[in-house]
Amino acid sequence: MTTTRTTMADSTTEAPDGVAGGRLVVSARVRIIGWMVGVLALALVALVFLTWEVLSARADAAADKELTHEGNKFRAFAASPAAAQFTRPEDLLDRWLQSNLPDDSEALFTIVDGREFHRSQGTPPARLDTDPAFVKQLAGATEPSYGWVDSTAGKVRYGVIPVRIGAQPVRAQLVVLEFRDVIAKPSIDAAKALVVIAAITLVLAAGACWLVTGRVLAPIRQLRATAERIGETDLSRRIEVVGNDDVAQLAGTFNTMLDRLEEAFEAQREFVDNAGHELRTPITVIRGHLELMGDDPAERAETKALVLDELVRMNRMVDDLLVLAKSERPDFLQLDEVDFTELVVEVVAKARPLGDRRWRVHTTADAKYVADGQRLTQALMQLVSNAVRHTKAGDRIEVGAHLDADGSALLWVADSGPGVAPDDRDRIFDRFARGNDQRRTDGAGLGLAIVRSIMRAHGGDVRLAAGPGARFELTLPPVEVPHR
Ligand SMILES: Nc1ncnc2c1ncn2[C@@H]1O[C@H](COP(=O)(O)OP(=O)(O)OP(=O)(O)O)[C@@H](O)[C@H]1O
Ligand SMILES: [Mg+2]
């Protein structure tokens, strides 16, 4: 077998766009990346969202805590002996504003008689003391209260504490402002960084996935391109197996399949060649005789007999070829219980008219086996007709059957003729193979091939036992005989 190696390397020229296979691989790649990026994006969005929720809740809690702390500090001051000297609430509040420095995220201011009075030192993130509506809303407070208000610096948690000296009516309030978004700034920055990192991760992952899928799918694409080329030209090309990975195994399996295909095609071609050649011979003979046939009645009768003889031979050959072709089909055998004694006796009875021989029958009693009785008879008749052909009058021909204890069976046809030449022993089972020593053959060499097909269909085989004479044995594997 001549084998042209097609390397995967020289098939790197990819199929042009528009080739169905090429599109298929690209879309598989896009699909893989789509799924991967989708799942990753979902996970990252969930991560960012959860982180943001947690940080946000923490910022709210921190603003509340600061507000409570400021309120408690002021209450402690108001209850201290140092505060007792003040008779007017505005003086008390001024002192508090002077002595209490707010954080960057805090601001204090006071309301006296309904108007913004003073504010704490430093520059607050946003001015709410200058918002008349806000001041007016808080000025009426006679009880401590708190709430949320929006400002130019984001959400603000505010608390208002009314201040009263002795039994005087409430005239003044201390307002504490906690700028929640300023408190949360580190968290907001962290969340923003997280979003940026997530986006970069997504882009990098998509890029990495593109590269990896490209690498994984490239050998498969090359394999396909090579396979396509093999199909277009001939079956003798093979894919070079490089490495020991899955793709290499795929290439190996593919090569093995090509081996089998090539073998099958080769056998089929040989068979058709042989059949054509064998059938041409009788056709040529018939044609030649008919063309040369004269008007002489005696000659015409002779030609007619010869032509009919050739046609019978052709007919038999065609029948044999049909049996061989049919033996590949699953319905070739019709299984039933076969009584070997009956089978052998029947074969000998049919064979007797073929020639004057000393016929022998050899069977064990009650030898029953599940098989196709008609096909086995056909096989034995082929062997018996061969035996008759290779023996002379008075020679011995034995047909026998034997069933082993393990259920396997043996059928045989033995003759006392010259036997098969050692060089021919293996050859004669092939289709159209005839013995070399044959002086004049009128057979096509299909008989033993048919016997072998029938036996192999049964799971058995045919073999030629050692001489003297010719002894052909048919083996059958163990089969359970159904009890009836
Ligand atoms: N009993 C035998 N004794 C000696 N040689 C045999 C015997 N049986 C078969 N052979 C040899 O095996 C060859 C193949 O046999 P096979 O039955 O396949 O073909 P055939 O008898 O020549 O033709 P066909 O069976 O198609 O009419 C024969 O040509 C012969 O040389
Ligand atoms: Mg034969």
Image (spheres, rainbow, N blue to C red):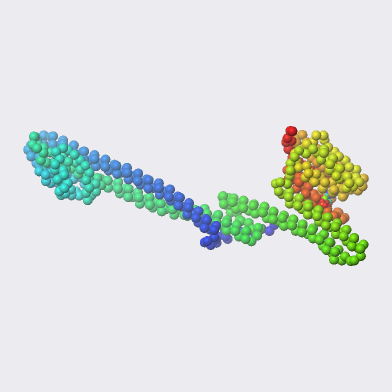
Q: In this view, does 481 lie to the left or right of 126?
A: right
The one nearer the camera, 326 or 210, is: 326
Residue 396 occupies which quadrant of the picture?
Answer: top right
Provide residue 78's location: percent of width, then percent of height.
13, 36
Provide residue 49's location: percent of width, then percent of height.
35, 46
Q: In which quarter of the image is the C terminus?
A: top right
Q: Is residue 213 left or right of residue 131?
A: right
Q: In this view, does 154 lie to the left or right of 402?
A: left
Q: Can residue 403 be seen in this view?
A: no
Provide residue 70's location: percent of width, then percent of height.
19, 40
- Rendered residue at 7%/39% (across/down): 88
Count of labels shown? 0
The one nearer the camera, 361 or 317, is: 317
- Rendered residue at 86%/45% (across/down): 351
Q: In which quarter of the image is the N terminus?
A: bottom right
- Rendered residue at 71%/46% (across/down): 331
Provide residue 268's location: percent of width, then percent of height.
72, 55
172 up-or-down from 8: above or below: above
Residue 335 occupies which quadrant of the picture?
Answer: top right
Q: Can residue 293 be seen in this view?
A: yes
- Rendered residue at 82%/34% (across/down): 365
The one nearer the camera, 115 or 375, is: 375
